[in-house]
C-alpha cells in the first residue's frame, strides 16, 4: 500500500512523492474442503445427466493487522468429467469463478486471545492428521512462527478419533477459524462437533 503526498512550493510548483506503508502479513491461514450432498440429476450434464457431489472450498486468513478475510467458492462437476489440474487432493479453491469474499476486524482483545491460543505449547506441537475413514472435511493450516511456518495437513477430520479426544488442540484451532468465518459472513452455525469439543488440556504456556 502506498500513500502519495503533494507539496506546493514557492512559485506554485507541485512536487509529489510516495511513501510505502508496511503490508499486513498473514498470521494464520486455514483452508477447508467439503463435499456436500450426493449425486443428483442435471440435464445439462452429457452424456450422463447427473452431477457429482458439490465441493465447497473456503479459506480464512488472519493478518497481523487484526483483519480477517474469509473466501468461499463452490465446484460442481458432471459425473465422468475429469477434475483437471491440479488434482482434487491438491486443490483448495474452485478451478473457475470468483469466490465470495468477506472481511471483518478483530478487536484488540480478540486478537490477543487468538494469538495466545496459537502460542500454546499443545498448538505448537500439532502434527498433521490423516484419517482413512469418514470425516467432516479436509483442512490445511499454516501458522506463522518466528522460526518459520507451521504447516498442518488434515485429511478426513474425525472429531471423535481417540487422538483428538485425548488432545483436542487441533479441533479448537479449526473451530476458532470456522467461528471467524461465520462471523465475517454473518451466516451459518458452528457444527455440533465444534460446539461440543472438550476443553483444552492444561499447559504450562508457550514452548
Image (tube, rainbow, N blue to C red):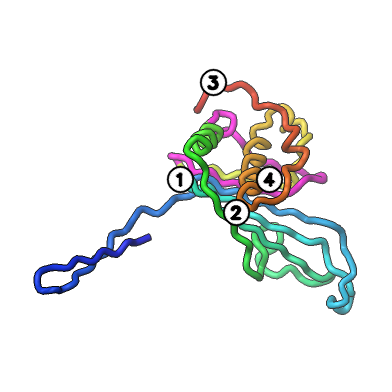
Residue 67: image x %, image y %? 50, 49
Q: Residues within 10 Å of mark 4 (few under 14, many from 20)?
A: some
Q: Circle 3 sits on which residue?
A: 204
Disc 1, SS? loop
Is 136 included in the stretch rendered in magenta? yes
Q: Circle 4 sits on which residue?
A: 154
Where are the magenta residues, as a range? Answer: 120-147
Q: Residues within 10 Å of mark 3 (few under 14, many from 20)?
A: few
Q: Earlier in the sequence, mark 2 or mark 3?
A: 2
> Distance from label 1 to label 4 (Cα)?
24 Å
Disc 2, SS? strand
Residue 41: image x %, image y %? 90, 69
Please determine whether, in this image, residue 41 is positioned above or below residue 194.
Answer: below
Q: Earlier in the sequence, mark 2 or mark 1?
A: 1
Residue 190: image x %, image y %? 72, 42
Of tags 4 and 2, the one toward the viewer is 2
Disc 3, SS? loop
Q: Circle 2 sits on which residue?
A: 70
Cβ atoms at labels 3 and 4 below 8 Å apart? no
The residue lying at 66 percent from left, 65 percent from top is: 86
Horizontal arrangement in the rendering, residue 41 relative to residue 125 (left or right): right
Q: Quadrant of residue 172?
A: top right
Q: Circle 1 sits on which residue?
A: 64
Of tags 1 and 3, the one toward the viewer is 1
Front one among 76 and 128: 76
Q: Earlier in the sequence, mark 4 or mark 2?
A: 2
Amino acid at each position: 500500500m502506498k500513500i502519495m503526498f503533494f507539496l506546493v512550493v514557492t512559485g506554485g510548483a507541485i512536487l509529489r512523492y510516495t511513501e510505502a506503508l508496511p503490508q499486513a502479513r498473514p498470521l494464520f491461514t486455514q483452508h477447508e474442503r467439503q463435499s456436500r450432498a450426493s449425486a443428483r440429476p442435471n440435464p445439462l450434464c452429457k452424456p450422463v445427466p447427473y452431477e457429482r457431489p458439490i465441493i465447497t472450498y473456503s479459506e480464512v486468513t488472519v493478518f497481523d493487522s487484526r483483519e480477517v478475510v474469509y473466501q468461499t467458492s463452490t465446484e460442481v462437476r458432471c459425473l465422468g468429467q475429469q477434475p483437471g489440474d491440479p488434482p482434487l487432493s491438491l486443490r483448495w479453491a474452485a478451478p473457475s469463478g470468483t469466490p465470495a469474499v468477506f472481511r471483518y476486524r478483530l478487536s484488540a482483545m480478540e486478537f490477543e486471545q487468538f494469538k495466545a491460543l496459537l502460542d500454546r505449547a499443545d498448538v505448537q506441537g500439532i502434527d498433521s492428521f490423516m484419517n482413512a475413514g469418514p470425516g467432516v472435511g479436509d483442512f490445511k493450516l499454516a501458522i506463522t512462527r518466528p522460526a518459520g511456518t507451521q504447516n498442518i495437513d488434515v485429511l478426513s477430520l474425525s472429531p471423535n478419533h481417540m487422538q483428538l479426544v485425548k488432545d483436542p488442540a487441533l479441533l479448537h484451532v479449526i473451530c476458532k477459524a470456522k467461528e471467524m468465518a461465520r462471523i465475517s459472513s454473518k451466516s451459518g452455525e458452528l457444527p455440533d462437533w465444534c460446539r461440543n469439543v472438550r476443553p483444552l488440556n492444561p499447559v504450562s504456556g508457550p514452548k
